[in-house]
Amino acid sequence: MAEKCILIADANAKAWDEFRQALGGSWVVVGAATGTAALAEAQKRAFDVIVANYELPKLSGLELLNRIRVTNPKTLRFIAAAEALKKKIMGQVSGGHEFLAVPFDRATLKSSIECSLADDCGMSQNMRALVSRIRTFPSLPSLYVEVVDALKNPNASTGDIGVIIAKDMAMTTKLVQVINSAYFGMPRTITDPTEAVGLLGFETVKSLIMTVKLLTQYDKVKPVYFSIDQIWRHSTNVAQTAKTVAMLETGDNACSGAAYTAGLMHDLGKVILAANFDVQYNGAHTTARKEHIPLWEVEKDVFGATHGEIGAYLLGLWGMSAEVVQVAALHHHPLRAGDTAFSALTAVHAANALEYEENSESDGLPIPVLDAAYLQQLGLEERVEHWRDARRDADAAKSETRKQRAKSAAKPAAKPVNPAPRANKLVPAASPPETAVFPALCRWLGLGLGVCAALALLARLEILRLESTLKKPEVHAAVRNPSAPVKQAMATVAAPVKALKETKPAPAPPKPVAPEIAVQQPPAPTPPPAPTPDQVPSPAAAEAFDHLKLYAIFYSAQHPSAVINGQLAKVNEKVADCRVLDITPSSVTLEYQNQRKTLTMR
């Protein structure tokens, strides 16, 4: 095996020794203390890898790597710096650089470099050459970084994320547009970004931010053969269908969420190719149409890599999950993954083909088809018709939602009854139409009858209360042998009873002399029984319940669901280790360690 060469540009010579010990005898390690010295070494010989410290003297690490990108395009480039500087550095990157954290971890240093260099890690020689030619590589969206940092706080809420997104008007508009699309079928229009975050969930919002912000970096790219708006529509449709297919096959929120994220990002490589190689990519489209060859095969011939592979490289550079990177790279060639079970790759591959089947926005290009050998390997060939049906059902539901919204929008607005008169001109108030008089009288008559019924009920209750008082033994004794003061007191008590029972009003009794009557104190109320042990939530259960917050309920008799802590959950699913027992139109009952708590909508 031929020796590989690596150049370490670092003012500290100890770093050179660290790489020699970590990489072993199969590597030739050359050190340079300054950026200019490193450039001189790169002119003497070809290096497979160069690692440059960010804080190099005379010539910064980034400037050195940018020059190496031009003079040695096939060299794999790493920038080394403290982890705290990663966000700042990667935002300044104008080409395909990778990041190494300082101080170095010897245990992973060799594997990190060799994996990045290996062909089977998505960095073939052709791929590295292509990346080196890309001058407008998009930077990691700052809004995405801010949201990810906020979510590292375990107490982060939808309100916190909504506030961050609200600062970006374009992102807020796109987020509201997505949640109000027919796919989600909201019964009302959502305008608050915080509410949108709660309904979509954190992972979906993160992937939307990533995709939208990347596409907006290329707003000025307007090739005649290519539409970024079309890419957005196709990507969102694929994401939605992939999520539906994944939920149908697995019933797993994590798998369906990964499928949605990967579906949104699977075609980002097309945007990068169009932005950097306009003429060549136009030629690739023309060849694919004329020869009726799949576009990704022409991309491989022209650029040495497909849009899937270049998109996967970008997503890997940004630190996306290995699953999302794999989907981007292999969504046209899923058999290469060697999977034996359904995954997000399966969902996106199927969704991509199904969307092209039903959608005419292929611009004359050959459309992708399902990989029969891959589906047979997974034993899923008989499930394709179920996926088609699920997609058509989703389309029908979206169409019905659009019709309902159009019907609501078509209703004429109510006209004002009495428009305000113009200044300095007396206009008599319009008389109500005759047809409105009778309903108004009925409303007033009904209100009067209701008041009378309420007063009669109160009077009857007062009579019963007083009769009950008179039936007490001590009162009966006073009636049988009343003293003068008691007679006067009884007369005061009996007067209202007699007045209420007689139809004719009785004359008011003479004002009695205030008697000195001892008032009997009511018995002390009986204290409530102490709660039994199973009624008192344990400290662990109380703590678990305290962290739950109910945001919304989507109730239907067959499929009720609710948004709790920003997560959409159904009956028997878990949210923060609490199991959902029941969902009603106004409440959700959860269980934790055999303790139960009901959350209600406020």
Image (cartoon, grey):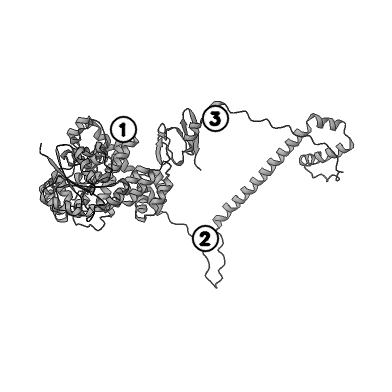
Residue 436 to residue 532: above or below: below
In x, y percent, where is residue 294?
Answer: 14, 45
Dot 2 corresponds to which residue?
A: 417
Residue 463 to residue 192: above or below: above
Q: Tell me how far mark 2 sits from mark 3, CA to CA.
A: 58 Å
Residue 305 seen from this side: no
Q: Residues within 10 Å of mark 2 (few under 14, many from 20)?
A: few
Q: Amino acid at mark 3?
A: Val
In the rendered image, which quarter is residue 494 located in? top right
Q: Amino acid at mark 2?
A: Val
Q: Is residue 517 left or right of residue 590?
A: right
**Which label's residue is closer to the chain start, 2 or 1?**
1
Disc 1 element: helix
**Which label's residue is closer to the chain start, 2 or 3?**
2
Dot 1 corresponds to which residue?
A: 250
Dot 3 corresponds to which residue?
A: 536
Disc 2 element: loop
User: In the drawing, what numbered circle is on residue 515?
Assistant: none
In x, y percent, where is residue 55?
Answer: 26, 52
Of the residues tagged 2 and 1, which is closer to the observer? 1
